Image (cartoon, rainbow, N blue to C red):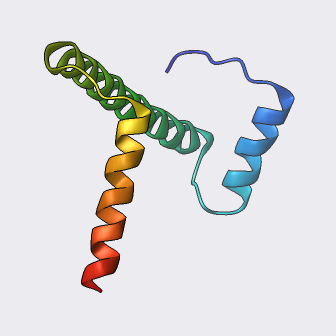
Amino acid sequence: MPNVSLTPEQQQFIDARVASGRFASASEVMRHAVRLMQEAEERRERFVAMLCDVSARADREGTISAEDVDAELKAVIAAAKQRA
């Protein structure tokens, strides 16, 4: 395992997780932390990809103004209220 330097606060945090019984060892805490970081990075990458897709679609198909979106939402809400 690579050598990792931690701040005293980080080491105390890890020690407390092990002492609580939630984790069996500092290595287990670190593996859990890395898994969470991997998941966060995957979510970020999916979000960035979605933004790129939306941007490319907007370039191809054009965009509408915020005022047009607002007017369309108001029309949908008004129609829903009339049906209710």
In the rendered view, tell whether residue 8 sits above or below residue 2: below
In the rendered view, tell whether residue 30 sits above or below residue 84: above
Residue shown at 21% from the left, 13% from the top? 59
Q: Seen from this angle, which residue lies furthest right?
A: 8
Q: Residue 26 versus residue 38: which sits nearer the camera? A: 38
Residue shown at 27% from the left, 70% from the top? 79
Find residue 44 and report its horizontal and vertical position in percent: 40, 29
Q: Residue 53 versus residue 47: which sits nearer the camera? A: 53
Q: Seen from this angle, which residue lies furthest bottom?
A: 84
Q: Seen from this angle, which residue lies furthest left?
A: 60
In the rendered view, tell whether residue 5 sits above or below residue 36: above
Position of residue 74 in the picture relative to residue 16 (left or right)? left
Residue shown at 28% from the left, 18% from the top? 55
Q: Residue 58 versus residue 77: which sits nearer the camera? A: 77
Find residue 42 and report its horizontal and vertical position in percent: 34, 31
Residue shown at 35% from the left, 30% from the top? 47
Count of numbered labels shown in the rendering: 0
Find residue 16 and report its horizontal and vertical position in percent: 76, 52
Position of residue 53 in the picture relative to residue 75 (left or right)? left
Query: On the image, which quarter does residue 50 sit in?
Result: top left
Quadrant containing the C terminus in the rendered view: bottom left
Position of residue 74 in the picture relative to residue 4 (left or right)? left
Find residue 65 and report its horizontal and vertical position in percent: 37, 29
Q: Residue 6 versus residue 75: which sits nearer the camera? A: 75
